[in-house]
Image (cartoon, rainbow, N blue to C red):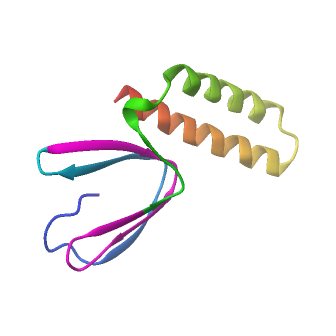
Amino acid sequence: MGVLPGHVATIAELKPGVLSVHEGNNVNKYFVSSGFAFIHANSYADIIAVEAVPVDQIDSAAVQKGLADFSQKLNTATTDLEKAEAQIGIDVHSALNAAITG
């Protein structure tokens, strides 16, 4: 989703993924785990994120380990809560992996 001049006011849920912030010619990319975007009628946006990490600071090895750990937890989960927690971990780590691999 892009925000250009004249954008209609919007509230949107953020799912795990990359948020690009354009300031002049500079583009900074952040991984956000979840949150909300509030786009105002004047085309300004407020981002409320649970976590935001610069993409270039993400540790690829830690992402792979986390993905493997949560996959194992999903395979051994016995309750709906354990399954849900493991699936959320897989979703976030999969999005992290996509963020660093482009």
Q: Residue at x 21, y 51 (%)?
A: 22
Residue 67, how many percent across, how many down?
A: 62, 29
Image quarter where the N terminus lies is bottom left
Q: Residue at x 83, y 32 (%)?
A: 76
* Magenta part of the chain: 26-47
Residue 74, how many percent across, how many down?
A: 75, 35
Determine if the magenta segment contains residue 30.
yes
Q: Residue at x 66, y 24 (%)?
A: 68
Which residue sits furthest top?
61
- Left or right: where does residue 94 sit relative to residue 83? left
Residue 94, how many percent across, how many down?
A: 53, 35
Q: Residue at x 22, y 63 (%)?
A: 3
- Left or right: where does residue 30 sit relative to residue 25? right
Q: Nearer the viewer, residue 52 or 79?
A: 52
Is 47 placed above or below 68 here?
below
Is 73 placed above or below 61 here?
below
What secondary structure predominates along the stretch shown in magenta? strand
Image quarter where the C terminus lies is top left
Residue 86, how many percent across, how many down?
A: 72, 40
Q: Nearer the viewer, residue 5 or 82?
A: 5
Residue 37 placement: quadrant? bottom left
